[in-house]
Structure formats: C-alpha cells, structure tokens
Amino acid sequence: MYKILNLVASICLISIGLSACKNEKNMVVINQETPDDIKNDCFWQGPYVISDPETNFAYPDTGSTYWSAKYTLPEGAILRLKGDFPYARYMSINSYNTDTTPADSINDGAIIPDKNSINPFVDGNLRNHQNRAYTLNLASGKAPSNGRAINTIYDATQNNESAVLLYRVYVPNKGKNMKGGVKFPQVELTTRQGEVLTGEAACKALNASNKKLTIPLIPADTYAKARQFNPAKEKPVWRASYSIAFSLQCDFLGICDTNPIKGIAYYANRDNQYIASSIDRNIKPVVVIRGKIPTVPKTVNGEEYLHSKNTQLRYWSICQNEFYSQKVTSCLFDEEININTDGKYTIVTSLPKDRPKNATEECGVGYLEWSDKGDGFSIVKGRQDHETDGRLIVRNMLPSSNFYNAIQNTQTPGDESQIMRDYLPDATYYTKEEFEALGCDPSQKM
C-alpha cells in the first residue's frame, strides 16, 4: 500500500493535462497518398498519418488525416482562412492550449459558407455541390462565454504566444485524396497598417513554423512504476477518458473513486469522446470485440446528401494502440465494418501470426492488427516494451441530442455500462483454435 500511495503522489505531479488497416477485399480504402497530399504549404504541416513514424502519435485515427499550424499573430493584425469544404464525412479546425488540451474549435456544420456557396454538411444541401467556399477568422485570446463572433476560432494565446491549430478531414469520398479533394485552407493576413498578405509573405509575417508537432510523453519513471501493476483484466473493462493521470490511477492501481473532471488532451478533437480498454495477449492471444455501432450517415460512396438528422453519431471507430508511445496500429471505422445478423459487429484483434482463419470479412468478422511492441515503451531509450500489452480505443463523434447512449453522456467512472448499454463493446479472450472452432459467421455461436 505504501508503494501505491507514493506512486499516486508522483502521478498527481504530472503537469501536462494528459488525458491503416489492411486492405481486405471490398474494404473501404482511404488515406491514399497523392503527390498533393504530401506537399505542405508554408502554413500547414503534415500529414499526420500511420505510415510516418514521426507523426504517428497522440492516438490518431486512421479514418482521419491531420495537419498542424503554429504561428504568432502580429499585434493589431487580422488573420483569415479561406477554403473549400472537403468532399468527406467531416472536417474541423481546433486550437490548443500549451498543455495540448483543446482551447476552441469550429466544425463543418457550424460554418456559414461564403456568398453564392453552400455548406455540404447541412442536411438538405448537396454534398457534391461545386460552390463550397468558406472564410474563417482566427482571433487571439480565449473564446467569450457568450456573444462569440460567427465563423471564428479563438486561439487562447496571450502575451504574444504561438498559436497551434489542427485541421482534420475524416473519411474522404471514394476517389478523393486525404484532403477530401480540395486544397488547404489558405491564409490571408491583414496587417495593422491595412496591407493584405497571402502565401509566403503572410507566413513570414506570422512567423509560421515549418516543423511538425511533437507530443509530451508520460514521465518514464512514473509509467514504469505504474506498469508494475498490469492494467489488463481477464474480463476487459471499458472506461471513459478523463485524463492520463486518472487512467494511471484507475487502470493500473485500481483507484477509481476520485471524482475526476472529464477532459481530453494529446491534441484531441473536441467533437470526440472516447472509451478505452487495456488487454494482454498473455491471457489469451486473441481478443474478440462485439457490440452495436450507432447509426451514422453514409458518405464514402459520394452519397448525394449527408442525412445526419436521423442518425445517432456523425462518426464511430475502434483502434488498436500502443499505450505509452501513443502510436496506432490499426483502426476500423463504421462503414468498414460488417454488421452480423444479430445487429452487432464482430471484430478480432491479434498478432498476424495468431489471426484465426475465420477472422475475415467473408465470415462477417473485422480484424485489427495488434502491435508486436505492446505498449511501445521502448520509444524511451533504455526502456523495454511490455510486448503483450494492447490498448483499444472507441470514438464517438457529434452525437445527436436524443442519443442518450453516447460516450459523451458518461459522467462518473463506472457508469459506462449504464449509459452506453448495447453500444458498450463486450471483449472476450480466445485462443486461435477456440475462435476457429466457431466456423464462418461465428456470431451465430457467440
């Protein structure tokens, strides 16, 4: 007990408020790089994708692509972004505090389009309409509690600090590139003297960084002490995200009754909330996840309308991750997943060598590859991976007001089952042989 109390004290000193799937037959293919994708402009840096070890951090989602910007707004200047809505499921821009927590954001549906343009993310508007321009304003300081300006993002900076933005595009239409078939939002800076700058001139005046972001890690000694206690349970437990300090206390030490404040960090998206579960191949080498996916709008095939009014979420995904390094190994999002005859999905995660023969799309089973680095602790020099660890993360984005079972409605650690009900996944350990014995369409026997 003395050891645990000392560790809790060290966890509380953490000062940063931390809170590409294989292409199977008929699987949706996204994030296909084109020359335009990997070409940055002077303002936006990226892309942050699974294929780049330097940008695979902060628990990214392979259904999304990210670009960052870091700049300093000159005193008295006005900064605008002029862009086109992507041909995609979703887009947003978030600003961030210095501790990597979101400061402010604006998403597609909240943006008023330019004159003679339409917002394709509004129900009733054509998703593929050619006139899709918008203009956003970027303002210094915190967002006002009321009376905020339209089409405006507040960067939370003060005393001439650098601002950080992340631009996200989720699930481009089939045939579109990572950006959803449009260019980056272009920067336009009006100086205090009234001069309008664009392109390289604007970037120079903004002192825009040409470097990608990095992410702070949990202090290695703190994590090493916590990882003396295995967070995985024989019956996997799903917990809503509150903070990394809470995860260390609750998942690793079993101290869960601390009334944490729900928050997200690691450059997370304000429109998402998350549940996560720790798993361990030492228990058995295959984990099978079953549950219900909330209804979402179909968009991958370039559908004519968004049809979001009668859906429960904008987007849903499940990912397999390395807990310490924050790297993602593989993900599946809603339109990639088969729904079984009982209305649930069946997803298997394992090392490729342990993948059951019936863990295939033809048998109604999705597959997530498990990292052979486990928690990825070896990202720190001199540390060793806990190679059998795994971390599953489920995302809920923009729930409808009448969808009570969304992760966003969890409020107290332990209420996940009561709130989410059938939408809370059920995870079970199997051997490869045990799962193969269920045959094709194993959901019929589970």
Image: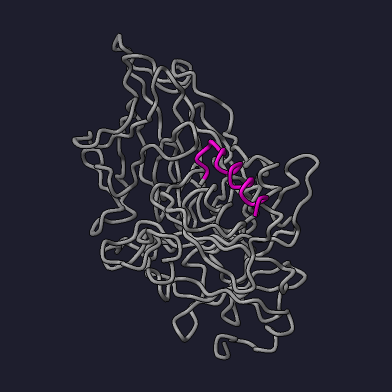
Q: Is residue 89 magenta?
A: no
x then y, percent, for residue 227: 69, 53
View extreme (top): residue: 193
Please name the colour scheme applied to the rendered image. one colour
| Image position of 8 (left or right of 94) | right
Give the residue drawn at x 72%, y 48%.
377
View extreme (left): residue: 147
Q: Is residue 186 above or below residue 428?
A: above
Give the residue drawn at x 53%, y 63%.
318
**For this rendering, which residue is in front, 401 or 201?**
401
Quadrant assignment for the N terminus:
bottom right
| Image position of 340 (left or right of 119) | right
Q: Main secondary structure of the magenta part?
A: helix
View extreme (right): residue: 382
x then y, percent, for residue 194: 29, 12
x then y, percent, for residue 252: 62, 57
Give the residue drawn at x 31%, y 30%.
137
Quadrant assignment for the C terminus:
bottom right
Q: Is residue 93 above or below residue 226?
A: above
Q: Is residue 160 above or below residue 285?
A: above
Number of dots carrying numbers: 0
Q: Quadrant of residue 299?
A: bottom left
| Image position of 12 (left or right of 355) | left
Q: Which residues are magenta?
A: 1-18
**For this rendering, which residue is in front, 55 or 135?**
55
Q: Quadrant of residue 81?
A: top left
Q: Is residue 11 magenta?
A: yes
Give the residue drawn at x 28%, y 43%.
111
x then y, percent, for residue 76: 31, 14
